């Protein structure tokens, strides 16, 4: 236990708190940064609270308020599963401290448990920010007592353990074959896809085996909080967690929490037992596997003259797609989330799709829905917000090459804009298919406006990275996971979604052509202002790159 606690403390210092400075000047900067992050956090929490209140109030009028708890916890479990798969692979097997820790007289499970503690602590930040305020709103709307809030905190401390453990167990099983890999980076990316594919297949299997008949649905609707039974079957600890919060004032709540705690402890013990057998094999395999060295030949006449923007863009794309950490953290989520939701949704009953297609379609509202979904997905693309930080100390190279700084900034925005087009098209096609609404104007307008928002997003996020670059890092993992600039991505997305929701509500009766034209003009004007800012301030924007 002493070894585990000591290792946990060391891993926390080397991963999360590595770059905290003790100088007075840096402390003052850190205080201002913390205040800015707190203000943005309050803004995000306020939005979550408002959306939660609307949803809980609607369900409460139907006497189905607990459905909110089930849906929110299920979303939290999915979020943790996806985050933990990528994080655990990097943290457990590809961090630079592994080579220093493995030779020490420490048992494999002690290393893994300490790293799992670090992973769990980082997940708690996401869970509490995403879930705590909605649960408080739920308690206020439903008139819950003090015990409900106590149980809520306990649930948020225990519930994330299971999805994190499941992710780590899957990663350990796949990484036990890492010694056979000749290319470590490619093996890491392929393993990531295989694990996520396995999770999707299990989800689809569970959904196909929990179909609800019309009679059962009517029975659930007539019972208080009966609809929550539909979502409780999708995850092993969802039912005891929801039952604990619903029955907080009775002995049934204590029994349900005991069940949740028991399942968590049993799976944790299984995790320790398997880690003793599997972790060392995978960690050693990951450290010795790698790319075979290739001889470099200096061949005359092989160089060709190409456009500067094309070469610059190629360099940025290679960095994103060949580096597994950058690929999984910056690119993959934007493609993965729409695919997962589409597969899960379209695997549902055909009757649900028929009911949706029979609804009256308002073109302006559908346009706002498509733009809103695409804007949300943009917050998952961390390419522009890390464009400078990914170069690390080599970012100073920008100041010395004979390419105008303004053009370099634009070139670094291009990958984000190009990659965002793929999920944008995917969402538009999915909505058209779902609603059986193949309107040419809707497709063109939603595509143009979504791309304009993507350009504005990329421009603004690279300004954030230029103002707050993270250039001192030892591992690529720190560029994304230890970079507080990510919160600006979510702040932009939430602000735009609120504007889109207001626009959809107030302009629902307006002609789609007018709405699309006004939206495009406003976005083009904003892009023009930011572009002009780049031209005038490009030299000063790179002051922090030294």
Image: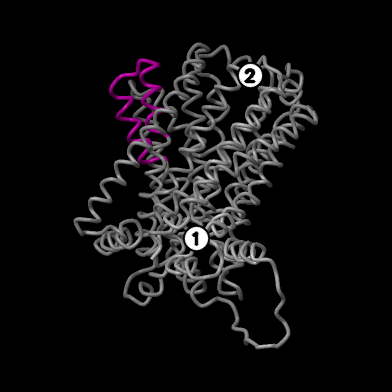
Inspect this view and state whether residue 506 appears: yes
Q: Based on the displayed image, in which of its 4 quarters is residue 408 positioned? A: bottom right
Badge 1 vs badge 2, beta-carbon distance below 8 Å: no
Q: Based on the displayed image, in which of its 4 quarters is residue 280 positioned? A: bottom left
Q: Residue at x 45, y 47 (%)?
A: 486
Q: Position of residue 261 (x, y in %)?
A: 37, 40
Q: Based on the displayed image, in which of its 4 quarters is residue 138 positioned? A: top left
Residue 134 covered by magenta stretch: yes
Q: Residue at x 53, y 24 (%)?
A: 228
Task: Tell me: residue 473, above or below residue 66.
Answer: below
Residue 73 covered by magenta stretch: no
Check residue 89 in the rendering and tell me which mark sits there, or answer none: 1
Closer-to-camera residue (30/95):
30
Inspect this view and state whether residue 258 appears: no
Q: Position of residue 139 (x, y in %)?
A: 37, 21
| Local secondary structure at mark 1 | helix
Give the extent of the magenta segment. Answer: 131-159
Mark 2, residue position: 217
Check residue 361 in the rendering and tell me which mark sits there, or answer none: none
Q: Residue at x 63, y 61 (%)?
A: 313
Q: Is residue 541 left or right of residue 426?
A: left
Closer-to-camera residue (373/165):
373
Considering the whole magenta stretch, tell me its main secondary structure: helix
Task: Tell me: residue 66, above or below residue 318.
Answer: above
Task: Tell me: residue 29, above or below residue 352.
Answer: below
Closer-to-camera residue (283/500):
500
Q: Is residue 340 left or right of residue 390?
A: right
């Amino acid at each position: 236990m002493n070894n585990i606690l000591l290792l946990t403390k060391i891993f926390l210092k080397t991963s999360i708190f590595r770059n905290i400075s003790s100088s007075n000047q840096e402390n003052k900067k850190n205080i201002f940064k913390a205040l800015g992050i707190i203000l943005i956090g309050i803004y995000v929490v306020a939005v979550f609270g408002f959306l939660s209140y609307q949803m809980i109030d609607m369900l409460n009028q139907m006497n189905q308020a607990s459905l909110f708890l089930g849906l929110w916890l299920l979303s939290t479990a999915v979020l943790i599963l996806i985050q933990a798969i990528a994080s655990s692979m990097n943290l457990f097997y590809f961090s630079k401290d592994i080579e220093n820790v493995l030779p020490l007289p420490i048992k494999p499970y002690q290393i893994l448990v300490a790293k799992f503690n670090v992973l769990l602590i980082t997940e708690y930040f996401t869970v509490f920010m995403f879930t705590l305020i909605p649960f408080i709103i739920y308690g206020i709307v439903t008139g819950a007592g003090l015990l409900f809030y106590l149980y809520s905190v306990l649930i948020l401390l225990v519930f994330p353990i299971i999805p994190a453990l499941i992710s780590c167990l899957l990663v350990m099983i796949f990484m036990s074959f890492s010694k056979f890999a000749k290319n470590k980076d490619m093996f890491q990316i392929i393993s990531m896809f295989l694990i996520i594919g396995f999770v999707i297949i299990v989800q689809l299997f569970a959904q196909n085996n929990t179909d609800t008949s019309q009679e059962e649905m009517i029975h659930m609707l007539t019972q208080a909080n009966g609809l929550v039974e539909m979502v409780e079957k999708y995850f092993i600890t969802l039912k005891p967690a929801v039952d604990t919060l619903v029955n907080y004032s009775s002995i049934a709540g204590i029994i349900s929490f005991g069940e949740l705690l028991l399942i968590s402890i049993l799976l944790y013990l299984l995790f320790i037992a398997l880690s003793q057998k599997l972790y060392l094999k995978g960690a050693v395999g990951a450290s010795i596997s790698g790319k075979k060295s290739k001889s470099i030949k200096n061949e005359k006449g092989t160089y060709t003259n190409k456009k500067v923007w094309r070469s610059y863009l190629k360099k940025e794309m290679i960095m994103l797609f060949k580096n597994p950490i950058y690929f999984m953290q910056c690119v993959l989520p934007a493609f993965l989330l729409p695919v997962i939701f589409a597969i899960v949704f379209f695997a549902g009953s055909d009757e649900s799709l028929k009911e949706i297609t029979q609804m009256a379609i308002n073109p302006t509202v559908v346009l706002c829905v498509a733009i809103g979904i695409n804007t949300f997905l943009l917050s998952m693309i961390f390419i522009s917000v890390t464009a400078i930080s990914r170069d690390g100390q080599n970012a100073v190279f920008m100041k010395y090459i004979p390419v105008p700084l303004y053009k370099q900034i634009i070139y670094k925005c291009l990958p984000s804009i190009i990659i965002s087009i793929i999920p944008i098209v995917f969402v538009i096609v999915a909505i058209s298919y779902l609603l059986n609404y193949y309107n040419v104007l809707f497709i063109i307008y939603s595509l143009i406006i979504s791309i304009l928002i993507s350009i504005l997003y990329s421009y603004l996020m690279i300004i954030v990275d230029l103002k707050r670059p993270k250039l001192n890092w030892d591992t690529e993992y720190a560029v994304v996971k230890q970079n507080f600039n990510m919160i600006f991505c979510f702040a932009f997305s939430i602000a735009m979604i609120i504007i889109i929701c207001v626009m959809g509500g107030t302009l629902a009766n307006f002609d789609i052509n007018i709405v699309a034209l006004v939206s495009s003009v406003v976005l083009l004007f904003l892009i023009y202002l930011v572009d002009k800012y780049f031209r005038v301030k490009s030299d000063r924007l790179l002051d922090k790159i030294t």
